């Protein structure tokens, strides 16, 4: 039997689903739709990878692996909620929590020595960063703001900070020595087995990655970020921020680029705290402080020292903060800076937020200041500099009048632009890194120095064909201009452009405008249209897909969590994603402190709507189509009625919004005339939900205001969470029994 797979993930989205999923199952039960849950949370993925360490009663299924197989099935229908893209500090925290719960899993070995430690580290490294998405995304991405959300944003515009032409805010990026400027790219003409080798200055060879296959017509590129150039760049920019009197802010993607970006982050920390690391090097090495984990990890490590040593280091830390430039803050009240945790400041969320707020970020005094946005690698830094330049010249956008920028993203079959994980290495000694075929022929050779970051990426031919096809289909459906964001001066993009021009010839494009523009020019072109209220389709690779589907929605509708994200799987199935989860940790914090969850499940509602529609069409299930149509009407009414979660305790929160969605969904089903059986079923349900509205809302709101215990963070106690997330006995009785 066909079914819809609901993923269990992490943090606020996972908590919200505990409240919402019983409603979904209630509404779909009579329509021969099976809802099945698969756990791809960080804790579940850790336990599944260390099954041999667990007792039989502790072992769990490897649900991510199961879904990795399922996405190849033409009948696949998966609703994927936001999950933790784990940094090393997050993985270590999850390990501690699971160990405390009695799971015999090993520590994370920062510097593995034995083969067993290397194996352990390899297992954890396979879990960290964006480990889920490449497995599930067996198709390219179609992301856009739904019309209901767009119309609501125009009628209820979010706040936008005023831009001044003399704003000092700007982007600083490298002009040489980075991935963008060191890149080499080729398209292979035949299936080729290759390996990656490092050869030092004495000719000694070390295999970095064993044999793997590159397919015919596959694009490969290699690049290296030079440590020396990076450090010089960081030093220069820190001095400039100090002299200019503006905030220093670092913007990386330590979750997606999980090997390279933590290393870059660590270099910034070490330069900013240069005197601390030099003066206390012996102590910091002894307690295994890793700058890549951030200032927060350093502070935790020194707590184990004697009082005198701890105070000396703290004194020098405070001196560094006083003598350096102002640091952008993640949480001013708690003293958490931009350099505390690598996963706290994610470029695709932090840069749009800065731009929306007049180009300003928060300092330690909780004041907003102009900022220097450091984006070391220049590959895509230009999209943010173009946006800032545009706002300085034209002022802030007006959400009431803005057009929209949708995205067709190349990501199928693990399509990489930069930031590949299993082919990114920190270089141990001077020499060369070679990509070599099994016959010993060097395909690409690159000079490297100790501490450099070398990476290789791959993009297969079939996903590119599908990507071009999707772009043309969207263009013909909307008649909006289709813009391929590709730089004819970048080696990787040059190879992509050749294929785009070839595959466009296979389609009728007479009715649509198609352009190929560099990221800077594409940004400028799209912003000019957005300002005039016109729509544009952006067609990008995987990294830009991630960046743009935060940038434009945050400017247009105030958040990226309300995006409609469809992944038409290449074998015919569907993956339906539910928006971003970047603010989820703060939401969990508020829940535990005040029993109020402000997480908005709108992305989940939208994903369910298109999932039901897909289910109905692929299984000839008219009930599913009706459920989808009526859910869409319910979502519109939810927005118009302002029943989304409030930020304030004692008011409607996530659980209350679920009730109102159920109320409006049942109302729409009760009022339709196409299916009498559904109408009669949901007339009864709607009556019960409506007649008990006052009692249900009272039960949902009055229990707020107190601390609650989830029994964990990464691995919560399901029974405790069930009680917390379903606190209305009246609503539970209606959903469970009627």
Image (cartoon, grey):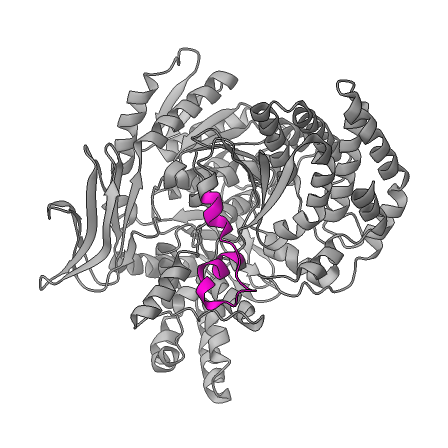
Quadrant for the N terminus in the image = top right
Could you say which is closer to the camera, residue 398 or residue 726?
Answer: 726
Residue 526 in the figure: left or right of residue 404: left
Give the residue drawn at x 10%, y 45%. Answer: 441
Question: Which percent across, then down, holds residue 479?
Answer: 49, 16
Q: Main secondary structure of the magenta part?
A: helix
Residue visible at 48% across and 88% down in the picture: 306
Percent position (x, y) of residue 255? 44, 53
Quarter of the figure with residue 283: bottom left
Q: Visible in this render: residue 403? A: yes
In this orientation, does residue 338 appear? Answer: no
Q: Which residues are magenta?
A: 44-68
575 to 679, vertically: above or below: below
Quadrant that contains the C terminus: top right
Left or right: residue 684 compared with residue 544:
right
Quadrant in which residue 186 is drawn: top left
Drawn side of residue 651 relative to residue 77, left or right: right
Residue 58 is covered by the magenta coloring: yes
Residue at the (87%, 41%) spot, across then down:
693
x, y percentage for residue 210?
Answer: 23, 53
Frontmost residue, 619 versus 376? 619
């Amino acid at each position: 039997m066909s079914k819809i797979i609901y993923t269990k993930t992490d943090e606020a989205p996972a908590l919200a689903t505990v409240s919402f999923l019983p409603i979904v199952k209630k509404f779909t039960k009579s329509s021969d739709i099976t809802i099945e849950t698969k756990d791809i949370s960080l804790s579940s993925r850790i336990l599944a990878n260390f099954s041999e360490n667990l007792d039989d009663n502790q072992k769990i299924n490897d649900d991510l692996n199961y879904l990795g197989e399922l996405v190849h099935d033409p009948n696949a229908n998966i609703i994927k909620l936001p999950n933790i893209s784990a940094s090393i500090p997050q993985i270590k925290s999850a390990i501690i929590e699971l160990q405390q719960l009695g799971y015999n899993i090993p520590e994370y070995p920062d510097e593995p020595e034995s083969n067993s430690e290397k194996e352990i580290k390899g297992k954890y490294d396979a879990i960290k960063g964006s480990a889920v998405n490449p497995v599930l995304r067996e198709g390219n991405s179609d992301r856009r703001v739904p019309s209901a959300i767009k119309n609501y944003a125009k009628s209820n515009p979010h706040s936008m900070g005023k831009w001044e032409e003399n704003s000092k805010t700007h982007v600083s990026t490298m002009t040489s020595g980075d991935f963008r400027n060191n890149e080499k790219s080729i398209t292979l003409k035949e299936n080729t087995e290759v390996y990656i080798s490092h050869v030092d200055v004495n000719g000694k060879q070390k295999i970095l990655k064993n044999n793997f296959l590159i397919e015919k017509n596959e694009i490969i590129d290699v690049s290296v970020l030079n440590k020396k150039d990076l450090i010089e760049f960081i030093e220069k920019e820190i001095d400039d921020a100090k002299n200019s009197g503006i905030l220093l802010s670092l913007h990386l993607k330590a979750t997606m680029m999980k090997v390279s970006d933590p290393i870059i982050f660590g270099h910034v920390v070490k330069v900013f705290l240069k005197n601390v690391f030099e003066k206390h090097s012996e102590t910091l090495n002894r307690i295994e402080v890793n700058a890549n984990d951030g200032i927060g990890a350093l502070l935790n490590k020194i707590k184990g020292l004697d009082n005198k040593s701890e105070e000396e280091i703290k004194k020098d830390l405070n001196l560094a903060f006083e003598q350096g430039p102002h640091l952008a803050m993640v949480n001013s009240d708690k003293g958490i800076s931009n350099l505390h945790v690598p996963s706290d400041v994610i470029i695709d969320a932090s840069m749009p937020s800065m731009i929306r707020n007049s180009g300003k970020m928060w300092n330690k005094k909780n004041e907003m200041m102009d900022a220097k946005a450091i984006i070391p690698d220049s590959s895509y830094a230009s999209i943010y500099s173009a946006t800032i330049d545009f706002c300085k010249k034209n002022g802030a956008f007006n959400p009431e009048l803005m057009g929209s920028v949708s995205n067709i993203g190349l990501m199928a079959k693990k399509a990489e632009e930069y930031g590949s994980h299993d082919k990114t290495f920190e270089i141990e000694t001077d020499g060369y890194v070679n990509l070599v075929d099994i016959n010993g022929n060097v395909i690409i050779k690159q000079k490297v120095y100790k501490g450099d970051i070398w990476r290789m990426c791959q993009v297969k031919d079939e996903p590119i064909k599908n990507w071009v096809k999707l772009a043309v289909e969207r263009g013909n459906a909307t008649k909006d201009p289709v813009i391929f964001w590709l730089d004819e001066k970048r080696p990787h993009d040059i190879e992509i452009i050749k294929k785009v021009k070839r595959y466009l010839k296979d389609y009728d494009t007479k009715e649509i405008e198609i352009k190929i523009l560099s990221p800077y020019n594409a940004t400028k072109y799209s912003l000019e249209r957005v300002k005039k209220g016109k729509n544009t389709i952006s067609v990008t690779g995987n990294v830009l897909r991630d960046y743009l589907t935060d940038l434009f929605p945050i400017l247009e509708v105030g958040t990226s969590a309300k995006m409609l994200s469809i992944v038409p799987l290449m074998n015919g199935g569907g993956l339906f994603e539910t928006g971003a989860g970047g603010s989820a940790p703060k939401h969990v914090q508020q829940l535990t402190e005040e029993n109020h969850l402000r997480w908005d499940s709108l992305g989940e509602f939208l994903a369910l709507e298109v999932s039901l529609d897909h289910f109905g069409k692929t299984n000839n299930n008219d009930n599913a189509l009706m459920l989808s149509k009526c859910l869409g009407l319910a979502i519109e009414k939810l927005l118009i009625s302002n029943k989304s979660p409030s930020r304030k305790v004692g008011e409607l929160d996530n659980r209350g919004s679920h009730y109102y969605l159920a109320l409006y969904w049942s109302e729409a089903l009760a009022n339709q005339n196409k299916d009498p059986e559904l109408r009669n079923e949901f007339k009864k349900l709607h009556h019960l939900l409506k007649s008990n509205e006052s009692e249900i809302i009272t039960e949902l709101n009055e229990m707020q205001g107190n601390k609650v215990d989830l029994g964990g963070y990464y691995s919560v106690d399901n029974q405790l969470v069930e009680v917390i997330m379903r606190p209305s006995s009246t609503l539970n009785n209606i959903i469970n029994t009627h």
